Amino acid sequence: MLELDHVICFVADQAEVALPGLAVDGGRVHTGQGTRNVRVVFERNYLEVLWIERAADVVARGLDFVARCARPAMACPFGCVLRGTLPDAVRPRFAPYALPDAPGVVLQLLAGQPPEAPFVAVFEAVDLEAMWPPRRMPSARIAHPGGATRMLGATITAAARPALDDLADLRFAIGAPRLALALDVGSWAHP
């Protein structure tokens, strides 16, 4: 079973981060990967806004984030990380990626995806509740000015779909790039 861990909005730099009505945490630097983020945390998942601080590190790690963060974006500027267990039928479509600043943590990246499709990765985990943001980010804030506490679902629209079926809380659509979040209080979309 897979569920949404977080959605990613790739931006050119921190100046592009505008999330009215949502509380943004300080995020962190992904040491050795060349990226930095801020996060909007909810009870079971979060929105990550990610940009590049050291392009050479991103390229060395084999990530396609340079094209996703460029403005105008040359690849789909959105993505997602799921959590759970990869079904045997789709496991051959994924390749392991060791997080450089988290020894022992390995993501499974959807391999061979076209750049116009969303970025997709999976944290393999048996205990899904242990992966909820408040449990692994103790200082995470989920008190948003607009009152939202839960992300009910996300829709990523792009020129191509990833080779993955929709999930209960994540849908993929074809069209102009867009990220839409359904929250327990309202919604949020980019652009």
Image: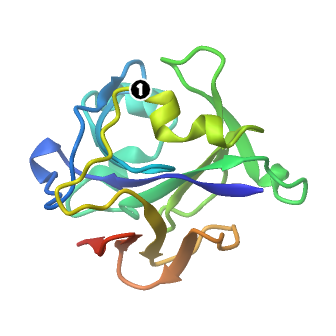
- Return the residue nearer the eye: 9 or 38: 38
- Return the residue nearer the eye: 59 or 147: 147
Q: Residue at x 57, y 68 (%)?
A: 169
Quadrant where the C terminus sits is bottom left
Q: Amino acid at mark 1?
A: Pro
Q: Residue at x 39, y 46 (%)?
A: 65
Determine the image quadrant of residue 19: bottom left
The answer to whether residue 137 is above or below residue 89 is above
The answer to whether residue 10 is above or below residue 103 is below
Q: Residue at x 38, y 19 (%)?
A: 31
Q: Position of residue 37 (x, y in %)?
A: 30, 37
Determine the image quadrant of residue 103: top right
- Return the residue nearer the eye: 57 or 144: 144
Q: Position of residue 167 (x, y in %)?
A: 66, 69
Q: Which residue is mark 1?
A: 138
- In the picture provided, is 129 more to the left or to the right than 22? right
The answer to whether residue 61 is above or below residue 32 is below
Q: Residue at x 70, y 72 (%)?
A: 165
Which type of secondary structure does the marked residue at label 1 adopt? Answer: loop
The answer to whether residue 66 is above or below residue 184 is above
